[in-house]
Image (cartoon, helix red, strand yellow):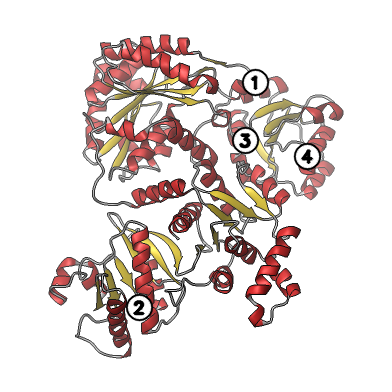
Amino acid sequence: MASSIYITSAEGHTGKSTVALGVLEALRHSVGRVGVFRPIARSTVERDYVLELLLERVTTPLEYEQCIGVTYDDVHADAEAALSEIVHRFRAVEALCDTVVILGSDYTDVGSPTELGFNARIAANLGAPVLLVLGGRVGQGLGERLGQADARTGDDLRQLTDMAMAELRDEHAALLAVIANRSDPAALDAIVAAVGASVAASPVGDAVPVWAIPEDPFLVAPSIRSIMETTGATLLAGDEALLAREALGVVVAAMSMDNVLPRLIEGSVVVVPGDRTEVLLAVLMANASGTFPSIAGIVLNGGFDLPEPIERLISGLRSTLPIIKTDLGTYDTVVRITHARGRLAADSQRKYDTALALFERFVDADALLARLDVSRRDVVTPLMFEYDLLERARAANKHIVLPEGEDDRILRAAATLLSRGVARLTILGEPFEVRSRAVELGLDLSQAEVLSPFDDVLRLRFAQEYARLRAHKGITLDQASDTVTDPSYFGTMMVQLGLADGMVSGASHTTAHTIRPAFEIIKTRPEVAVVSSVFLMALADRVLVYGDCAVIPDPTAEQLADIAISSAETAVQFGIEPRVAMLSYSTGESGSGIDVDKVRAATALVRERAPHLPVDGPLQYDAAADAAVGAAKLPGSAVAGRATVFIFPDLNTGNNTYKAVQRSAGAVAIGPVLQGLRKPINDLSRGALVDDIVNTVAITAIQAALS
């Protein structure tokens, strides 16, 4: 058994980089230190975009240059010397990691023996079993969507497998598993059976699992940026951020406007001769109208400059659609576009999400890792914790409402959540505007419900309920009707009335704006006096709970006790054994004063209300976190030096401490997680990243499952 894995293919364009990404994700959520290695690179000058992408996801600090063995030129010059150098450089990376994902060559003719044979030889010398990736289609690039590639049958892939098995056997390479990637979606079972039969008949294929991943046209579609590069074009107008959108087809608009418009295709790139300005304007108007397909971009070919009035007109349209200009003629432009390859790059979150979703659905990652000599460590890294959050949320299958549909970060996070099956979603906003922006960004939100907070039926229902709940405050139905159109109130009413299981907001609103409706409508659980918050602080080897860092500025002793008990319950919800440290500027009986006395009183209240809970205080942070200091300052304590839940005496201390640990120690701060409400409502930082939103939705779904 080996701890590293060699991913190679029997030919080019099999999509093995997407398989490598799936394997890397599975490993880094189970193993502490994961690295990546590329035995053969195209060049030491031109950087390898696949290696760069994978390096962004590894959990071992590695430099790009460390992770390359040799170049193709080195192999051609002296294959034996190149192999020796590959082994030498790999061992240096291996020494820093628990496991290494090794990505085989890209089929640019290494030489003799065959390229697969040479990859197999490398794998044998590195002691890494081979994960063989077979290609389910013939052809490459956007041309595949135009009928230039054929799906392989099970028999086709069986013959390919027979040849690959012979290469692996001849080079004494061990086979870990086989994945038939980009397979015909209608023939997955037949493909697995055919490939499995070939593998089973080979001496190297005993009990080797076989999986098939279906073709997804989106993964092979090139981005507008890739098309711009391959045609030597420049950006003439439009939003540069939308260059990342993928082109799912190509339309040649070299005819009259009347004939072009019916031929527009959703997600396509439209090639317009630069001197056909009337066609250019017609395509722009069609894209903006909402009654025609939404296109990904326009390529103006021929090198013609647009007349000044046309440039001024386009500028006045304020269209975000990318318009790029190339000097190539129509034929050469189309040829280059159809041969442009879609690649898995860091700037395409949708491709990343799609690749992972396909891998997770069609490959048994647990069975794959079980065949490797890797085991889950006792430590919990941030990546492991985040992965567990997503897995638990996926199992919970809860419905979460996101009120801020006007924020691109929310839309990007929603696309990730939906593609990974983490939660069911409702996004608040005007449906046409939200869906149009999602299309512009190249996001698939088809599985999300998009709902206007001005929906007449729900507005009346929510207003009646809100007026009833707030009648003691003199709220009338007319006032309630205005209030519930606020997205935070509308989303909260959805949760209150069971139309959603939880809500996540705050990316573009204040904390007060997010949680005030929850105070008024959802209210606290009967046994809880106050709503408070925690941050889940994912350090390098463990996860801690910090509370309260976001809600109560100066809690009383009673409130502090309530925060401690709620925080301990939250810790249990997320698999953290609670040992509660009540923090202060002194430890034990060594200090006195109003602040330390408050913490001492709160500690006594916690012991009285939750006698089962390990709690100690007052404790200084070092006495709570460091075993040696804890033993010296408070010997015999079950919490000192071993605390997992840290309760700060006030918001000033808590908020500054979590940010200091986040920035200085490199911790991942997940939260704030609100606690004490009857139903889960969670707040986002206004600086939240897409990953922060994804994690907070997962947390909310888990809370909903446990509430």
For mark 1, what is the residue? 146
Q: Earlier in the sequence, mark 3 or mark 4?
A: 3
x 49%, y 52%: residue: 694
Quadrant containing the C terminus in the rendered view: bottom left
Q: CA distance from mark 1 to mark 4?
A: 24 Å
Q: Whole-percent x and y of residue 705?
A: 45, 55
x 26%, y 70%: residue: 612
The residue carrying pointer 3 sits among few (fewer than 14), some (14 to 19) or many (20 or more) residues within 10 Å by Cα, namely many
Quadrant containing the N terminus in the rendered view: top left
Report the amino acid beneath label 2. Ala
Between 643 and 493, the one nearer to me in the picture? 493
Label 2 close to label 4 by CB (< 8 Å): no
| Disc 3, SS | helix
For mark 4, what is the residue? 284
For mark 2, what is the residue? 561
Kindly report which numbered mark, 1 or 4, lies closer to the viewer in this rendering: 1
- The answer to whether 160 appears left or right of 622 in the picture is right
Q: Earlier in the sequence, mark 2 or mark 3?
A: 3
State the mark number for residue 127: none
Kindly report which numbered mark, 2 or 3, lies closer to the viewer in this rendering: 2
Q: Whole-percent x and y of residue 599?
A: 31, 82
Label 1 close to label 3 by CB (< 8 Å): no
For mark 3, what is the residue? 224
Q: Classify 417 as above or below 18.
A: below
x 50%, y 62%: residue: 680
Q: Earlier in the sequence, mark 1 or mark 4?
A: 1
Q: CA distance from mark 2 to mark 1?
A: 66 Å
Report the amino acid beneath label 3. Ile
| Disc 1, SS | helix
Q: How many marks?
A: 4
Between 20 and 705, the one nearer to me in the picture? 705
Report the amino acid beneath label 1. Leu
